[in-house]
Amino acid sequence: MKIFLSILCILLVFSGCSSPYVEDNTVEEIAPVTFWSLNQGEGGKLKITTLVPPVTNEKKKLFTLNVDLLKQGKKEFNLKFYRELKLGQLRMLIINEKLAKKEVISLIDTIVSDPDVSPRLFLVLIRGSFEDFLEGEMKVQKNLDYYLYRQFLHYERRNQGEMSIVNLHEFMEKVYSPYSDPVLPIFKADKDNFTYDGTALFNESKYVGSINKREDQMFQLIANDHYLKNLPIPHLNVSLGQVRSKVHMQVDDHFKTLTIYVKVKGRVDEYRGHRNILSRSEMNRMIHDMESYLQRETVGVVKKTQRLKIEPLEVGAHTYSPLVHPMTRRVWLDHYEKMKVHVKYSVKIEPLSL
């Protein structure tokens, strides 16, 4: 009897004793999904769209379903396609802006709970019709889904400050942090274009507003990458390149005033004005105008976050003290909303750019 039990245990170990049901992961029988696009469907349902990336060189197919639940969508896809869809290669979750205004966190929670999904998948908000863009672009771009993923991966790795790139882990980390709120990139899509359109702002898990591309440049400098590859200032007829910033935020002891000091270093890449920027005095005047512009724009961004009572700039983190008990989120935001904002820029132009 003991010999029989020993043999049975060995067989269970080698056969995989965690479950008697083993999933079929034969390459020819699966279709790894790169992205899911989520939109409002008919009758309050959820509209899910994806491109089925074939393992072999066959034509890609655009699948769209209207379902009540996200998990139901995966099941319905599998009933309509001869390969089983696998989420192990899911790299992008693309959510339409109109749907985001109603719900975001429930959708993301469902994705987070799936053990097959990587926490490094990119989250994106879309204005317009991403489906129209897919319909048109997939005819000319052979591996469209992989191309989009590589685009996001490029900007994430290079930290070029061109856009807010956010993955699932980063988003959820800020959702549950008391002195910070998550952000997501917004892209505008139509049948011909897919372009960056700014940054979406959240109050914990609720989508509450956005900042446009012009304002987004200030956000990148003071709160995100602290770097811009290119900073155009059209009304000064100048474009700066390789712009780097150092930011110091200070909140007074009575939580009445927020002062932000920003040191910016860059070079003049293009100038189409009438000043002689080879003259030191003329350059100093232009630098003063740049500082005034950056201050106005940054104050505008900070005040928008105050009106929305959100913390994407993580100002509250600068109030921590070893001798003071930290405030609750609600108490801090009540202070933050009423604070006076002072922004001071110091711009330095590299001599080699002249």
Image (cartoon, helix red, strand yellow):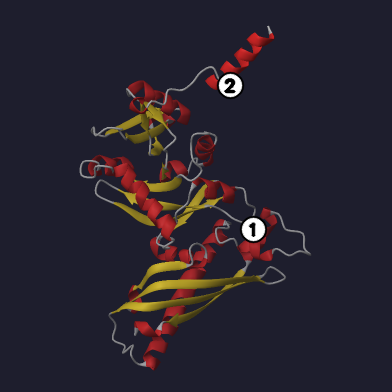
**10 Å crowding of disc 1: few (<14), some (14-19), many (20+):** some
Q: Which mark is residue 333?
A: 1
> What residue is at 46 percent from the left and 55 percent from the top?
210
Q: Is residue 289 visible?
A: yes
In this view, the residue in front, 158 or 35, is 158
Of callouts 2 and 1, the N-terminal one: 2
Q: Residue 281 vs residue 249: left or right?
A: left
> What residue is at 44 percent from the left and 47 percent from the top?
122
Tag 1: residue type? Leu
Quadrant where the N terminus sits is top right
Q: Quadrant of residue 247?
A: bottom right
Q: Which mark is residue 13?
A: 2
Tag 2: residue type? Val
Q: Quadrant of residue 66?
A: top left
Query: Residue extending furthest top?
Result: 1
> What residue is at 38 percent from the left and 55 percent from the top?
154
Q: Is residue 69 visible?
A: no
Query: Residue extending furthest left?
Result: 140
Q: Secondary structure at mark 2?
A: helix
Q: Which mark is residue 303?
A: none
Query: Residue extending furthest front?
Result: 3
Q: Residue 5 vs residue 172: left or right?
A: right
In percent of width and height, residue 261 lies at 56, 75
| Foreground label between 2 and 1 | 2
**10 Å crowding of disc 2: few (<14), some (14-19), many (20+):** few
In percent of width and height, residue 266 lies at 41, 77
CB within 8 Å, label 2 to label 1? no
In percent of width and height, residue 192 lies at 24, 49
In percent of width and height, residue 25 lies at 41, 26
Residue 46 vertical position relative to residue 180 in the rendered view, above or below: above
Quadrant where the C terminus sits is bottom left
